[in-house]
Image (tube, rainbow, N blue to C red):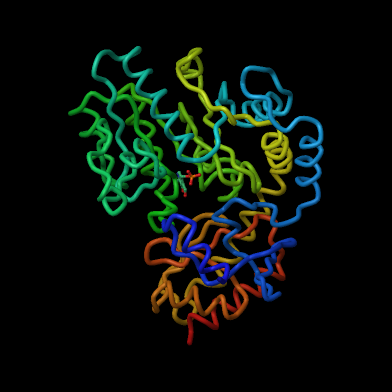
Amino acid sequence: MTAEEKDRLYIASTYSRFPLRLVRGEGRTVYDAEGKCYLDLASGIGVNIFGYGDKEWTAAVTGQLGALQHASNLYYTDPCIALAEALVLRTGMKKVFFCNSGAEANECAIKAARKWGEEHKGEGYYNIVTLKGGFHGRTLAALAATGQEEYHKDFLPLTPGFITADPEDADGLENALAENKCAAVMLETVQGEGGVIPLSEGYLRAAADIARRHDVLLIVDEVQTGMGRTGAFYSYMRFGLQPDIVTSAKGLGGGLPIGAVLFGGRTADVLTPGTHGSTFGGNPVVTAGALNIVSRLTPEFLAEVSRKGEKLASALTGAKGVKAVTGRGLMLGILAEKPAGEVISALREEGVLVIKAKDKVRLLPPLNITDDEIDFAVRAIKKVCAQ
Ligand SMILES: Cc1ncc(COP(=O)(O)O)c(C=O)c1O
């Protein structure tokens, strides 16, 4: 049997995979089982932000692996404390809860918001307003928070307590909060899975203001947009927003599974002993790697992410066969004249890996992509879109 046949036989059929078996990576390049190399503009869906085989991150991970691979949260361990401190110092948030994925981070945020609503606003104040087109994960509450019906069907009834508002409609948000007993508003600043759609600065500021006026929490899902992806450490920071809860995952681990929930002043002490937990959350190996990642997202590095994002976006905007380029920083969506699936397959032939987000081709390259690699990518994308 081929590997593909065995995969189909033994692995639950939740994924439609690209016809590629990847075996190793170096820098921004991955190699398939036949030895063909590809420039990776997807980085494992926004995870490998320093590419493959990054020496510093690997040393941080393997060093910790040799010392203590796991301890559980029954004990203190240094890497997770150091990572929490680094995240708090970097953001001004107050406390961190560690888990293992974006969906789990959002589940924790939802639990904390419900508890806060009950304690601070009263009985029945558990509703959370989320946005149409948003994506917050595949677990049941995160799924209910996800404002896209296509993910809901087959899994009804949805977890109650979620109200969907239209993005960019401040009045709609205001009405949803006025008409329901709410605990929070939850949103992404760029709807990634929803089609790389950036919410406008005006709307984001208005949403934060409306949440504050209605005395509900603002939860920002930074799972895809965080860790420098848009050119800011967390994307909300470029707008001066002050969320009450921030969820983080993907790039934070640099290639190992991690989720983090950051709590601000109003929510820091909501979760109390016994109210939440995770066996692996804050695992020493994963957090040692994440600490290395966080320490390297310096202002200079982030400025480079912005510059490279603008370079990529401006090179593709108006190119033949490209209808629009959306996104922020190195989180970009290309709406091509031909279907996204065709562009993705043709780019693979050209040695470039990209992924899809709705009708767009999505680019989430490693943040340390070089200018030469950007030039190579632009040539390939222009060629394929123009054909
Ligand atoms: C904004 C956002 N939130 C949550 C998730 C879920 O993260 P995970 O797949 O790590 O559970 C994703 C995944 O794409 C995401 O983009």
- Placement of 161 over or under 315, stated as above or below: above
Image location (x, y in percent) of residue 189: 44, 45
- Placement of 104 over or under 341, stated as above or below: above
What residue is at 42 percent from the left and 70 percent from the top?
Answer: 335
Horizontal arrangement in the rendering, residue 335 relative to residue 181 (left or right): right
What residue is at 39 percent from the left and 25 percent from the top?
Answer: 111
Q: Which quadrant would the N terminus be assigned to in this image?
A: bottom right
- Placement of 198 over or under 188, stated as above or below: below
Image location (x, y in percent) of residue 225: 52, 47
Q: How many marks?
A: 0
What residue is at 42 percent from the left and 72 percent from the top?
Answer: 340
Residue nearer the viewer, 230 or 125:
125
What residue is at 48 percent from the left and 13 percent from the top?
Answer: 272
Image location (x, y in percent) of residue 35: 71, 74
Residue nearer the viewer, 145 or 35:
35
Residue nearer the viewer, 83 or 197:
83
Horizontal arrangement in the rendering, residue 361 relative to residue 143 (left or right): right
When asked about the image quadrant of residue 51, the answer is bottom right
- Placement of 90 over or under 371, stated as above or below: above
Residue lying at the far bottom in this picture: please name it.
387
Residue nearer the viewer, 161 or 213:
161
Image location (x, y in percent) of residue 29: 70, 66
Residue lying at the far front in this picture: please name it.
1
When asked about the image quadrant of residue 374, the answer is bottom right
